[in-house]
């Protein structure tokens, strides 16, 4: 596809487009859950052992009690922009680097180690480009209900460097989608190979065989669960680093100190106040949200990719015909 003379990697573009749309839909559908999860994770136990939120549902009931139910959507626009751009760059980079590796190595399939490296490279490039949006979205979600500000106002509250709070830990966390998509891709290839054998066709004839919605959802859930459990302590540290300062709502949280802004500071704060269990506080909420989000993303991506592939093929043919007419005119 990349060798059509247009200089465009159409297959990577199809993967990126379908992945970005899937991310946009899943982010919007699950955003209230994401807000509750983020506020729950950002809270650190006080010296007296008190918690404002003992359960994930406490955040939801607080919004209802304050008549701020719509505040569960605070930061949605920023999060959608970040999710769309992030997913587009990630899926494009992952597909492009994977294709490049196969072309250079001459291998028919990519191994687990190479897949991890390719996924990590794509993730690192994506994180650097979208970190300010990610930081702003986290600050909006963890702001007191009804007090969230817009994207520009949120980023303007601190220095430009503070917009990159958590960049180091975000780069480390690129291993999360690396693990997820490696597991997903390997399981997907096995299922597709079985489908090809059942169809009795060659690999070339079935090059666009896609997973069913249920299979994509199931594989997405399994792959994301594995990645989440392995990386969760770093995930919570990242939320604490990016969270809005607690003094925005001093009337309700007078005993909380300012959130640590470094990974070492976050790890020390969790260890000193909550011990080992603190590193996994909110794990169930994280798994619930991320598994549903990733499973929906991959399911929607697989369904949309069928339409996207056909649409881009039509666009490619149109551009080719147009270029041919211009040359012969």
Image: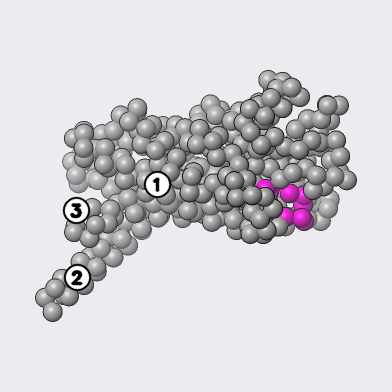
Magenta stretch in the rendered image: 139-148
**Can you tell which quarter of the image residue 307 is in?**
bottom left
Q: Can you identify the residue that label 2 sits on?
A: 323
Q: Can you identify the residue that label 3 sits on?
A: 3
Judge by depth and name the residue closer to the eye, 214 or 110: 110
Place of residue 98 in the rendered image (x, y in percent of width and height, measured from the top left): 31, 40
Farthest residue in the top direction? 276
Place of residue 149 in the rendered image (x, y in percent of width and height, measured from the top left): 70, 57
Residue 91 is labelled as 1
Q: Residues within 10 Å of mark 2 (few under 14, many from 20)?
A: few
Residue 101 is labelled as none
Farthest residue in the bottom direction? 329
| Real-space CA distance between mark 2 and mark 1, rounded to the nearest whole angstrom | 28 Å
The residue under the point 30% across, 29% down is 111
- Examine the rendered structure and indicate whether residue 114 appears above or below residue 32: above
| Left or right: 134, with 247 as reference point | left
């Amino acid at each position: 596809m990349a060798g059509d003379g247009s200089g465009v990697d159409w297959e990577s573009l199809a993967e990126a487009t379908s992945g970005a749309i899937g991310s946009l839909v899943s982010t919007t559908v699950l955003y209230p859950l994401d807000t509750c999860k983020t506020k729950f994770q950002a809270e650190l136990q006080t010296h007296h052992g008190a918690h404002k939120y003992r359960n994930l549902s406490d955040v939801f009931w607080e919004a209802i009690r304050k008549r701020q139910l719509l505040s569960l959507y605070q930061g949605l626009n920023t999060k959608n922009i970040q999710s769309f751009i992030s997913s587009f760059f990630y899926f494009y980079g992952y597909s492009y680097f994977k294709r490049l590796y196969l072309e250079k190595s001459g291998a028919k399939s990519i191994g687990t180690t190479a897949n991890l490296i390719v996924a990590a490279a794509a993730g690192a490039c994506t994180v650097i480009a979208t970190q300010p949006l990610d930081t702003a979205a986290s600050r909006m979600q963890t702001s007191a209900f009804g007090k969230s500000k817009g994207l520009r106002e949120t980023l303007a509250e601190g220095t430009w460097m503070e917009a990159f709070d958590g960049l180091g830990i975000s780069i480390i966390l690129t291993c999360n989608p690396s693990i997820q998509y490696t597991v997903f891709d390997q399981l997907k290839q096995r299922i597709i190979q079985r489908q090809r054998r059942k169809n009795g066709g060659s690999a070339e004839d079935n090059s666009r065989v896609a997973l069913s919605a249920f299979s994509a959802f199931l594989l997405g859930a399994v792959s994301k669960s594995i990645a989440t459990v392995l990386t969760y302590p770093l995930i919570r540290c990242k939320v604490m680093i990016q969270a809005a300062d607690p003094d925005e709502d001093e009337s309700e949280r007078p005993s909380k100190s300012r959130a640590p802004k470094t990974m070492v500071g976050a790890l020390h704060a969790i260890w000193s106040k909550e011990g080992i269990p603190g590193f996994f506080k909110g794990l169930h909420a994280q798994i619930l949200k991320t598994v549903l989000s990733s499973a929906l993303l991959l399911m929607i991506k697989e369904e949309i990719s069928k339409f996207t592939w056909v649409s881009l093929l039509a666009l490619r043919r149109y551009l080719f015909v147009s270029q041919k007419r211009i040359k012969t005119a």
